[in-house]
Amino acid sequence: MNNPRPHRMILTVILSLIFSALAGAQEKNPSAQVYFSLLEQGLNQIRGQMPVIVESAEPAARLLVAGGHLYSGGPQADFAPEAEGRSGGLMGMRPLAGATPARGDVVLYARTGPATDLDEQILAKYKADGVYVVAFMPRSSDRTPACDALIDTGSDQGLPLGEGADAKICPIDSIVNIAAMWTWTAELTAACTRLGRMPVLYESYGMPNGRQRDEKYTGRTFHDDMNVGPVSAQTLGNAYLDSLELSLRRIVAQQLPAIVTAGQWLRETPAGEAQCWFIGHMFPAHFQDSRAPQPMRLDTPINGQVKVKAGRDALVLFVGYQQAPQQLVDLAKTDGFRLAYMSVTRAIGDVADNIRYIDPAWDLPDAAVRIEGYDIPVFPPSGVLDAAIYWSIVAQAHAGETP
């Protein structure tokens, strides 16, 4: 017989070269791209929960049609601000903080990480009072909180920065909870249409007549002036997730160079010289996650005005909304500080070595899904996508520390 050992040795060498090449290719992937890949896996986790989302949305819809109220809250600080009073969201959504839900009401309860003793006490009290509870958190083998449904958003907390128990992360789970909440809201809306009712959803005030349109429906949970036919289960929720995934892939395909540059700028910026100006319901709470780095001072525009004082060594990140920060772009050209900004519309004359525009890959109405017979598109992607871009920049700034 021929001795198989030389062949095995050759095969071992070939496989070693292949694996080395693959490892080298992975090392060349920017940390920002790795972050987006993890987030897309999180969206797949939500898709896998679609049966639970539908099954929990249907009884919730019956309770709301019967006159119950809908609340959002829990330990995740950015969850309720994103869900309540939001473009593309439900006008009937109320903040849980300070409220006392009663029998027949519905509570959406979110946290990052598994349930704690305090969560179990709070949820048990809601259940004892006859409140219908939907929890958004990772499923744990150690605890089963008292809720009617648990939307398991997975155990992956985020992209590690460094090693060890004290290492920081760029969060994934908090964004996944937000995306799951909007997916659930989409399925709740569809379930209501199957009961013959169409919930009132907000239009962005940034759209023509958006404010006037919403004021007309102030205080209403359901429409009495629109005939929207029944929408089948999983249609709207999957449409929302499809939109997010398409946007994330557009960002990676088209915006990664600008994100990588912004991350490099952040890494090079002296301590205390980086600032982030933001517009959005879930900010700044989302950025203040104690598990994550806090590399920038956080500020919000006052009356739409960004009042920046920055030296040439400073970095300004603008997490914007629909309109471009033209004044800020002009100031960066004059004063020479580095500026990375995101907004749906792009500023005039922003082509400069110290300025990078990042297209957030969502459309002007900030609404991802069309419902046949409804007057506006609904369910906003901006919070999810803007937060993802922010953390991808932070991840890139810590590129040497990611495993």
Image (cartoon, rainbow, N blue to C red):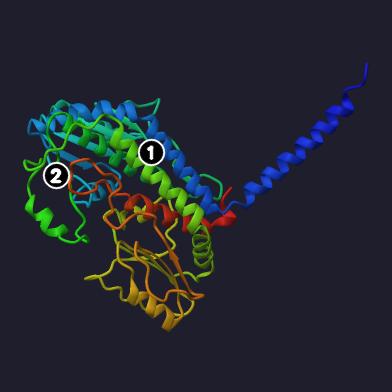
Residue 365 appears in view = yes
Looking at the picture, how far across and down is residue 266, in whole percent? 49, 65
Q: Residue at x 76, y 41 (%)?
A: 17
Classify the position of the N terminus by image quarter. Answer: top right
Q: What residue type is disc 1 on?
A: Gly
Q: Which residue is outermost to the top?
A: 1
Q: Which mark is residue 113?
A: 1
What's the distance in space between the residues labelled 1 and 2, CA to CA? 32 Å
Q: Which mark is residue 200?
A: 2
- Residue 293 falls in which quadrant of the image? bottom left
Judged from the image, the secondary structure of the residue bearing numbered disc 1 is loop
Looking at the picture, how far across and down is residue 402, in whole percent? 56, 51
Q: Which is closer to the viewer, label 1 or label 2? A: 2
How busy is the neighbourhood of tag 2: few (under 14 within 10 Å), some, or many (20 plus)?
A: many
Position of 396 with respect to 121 (left or right) is: right
Q: Is residue 280 above or below residue 265?
A: above
Judged from the image, the secondary structure of the residue bearing numbered disc 2 is loop
Position of 175 with respect to 106 (left or right) is: right
Q: Residue at x 42, y 83 (%)?
A: 334
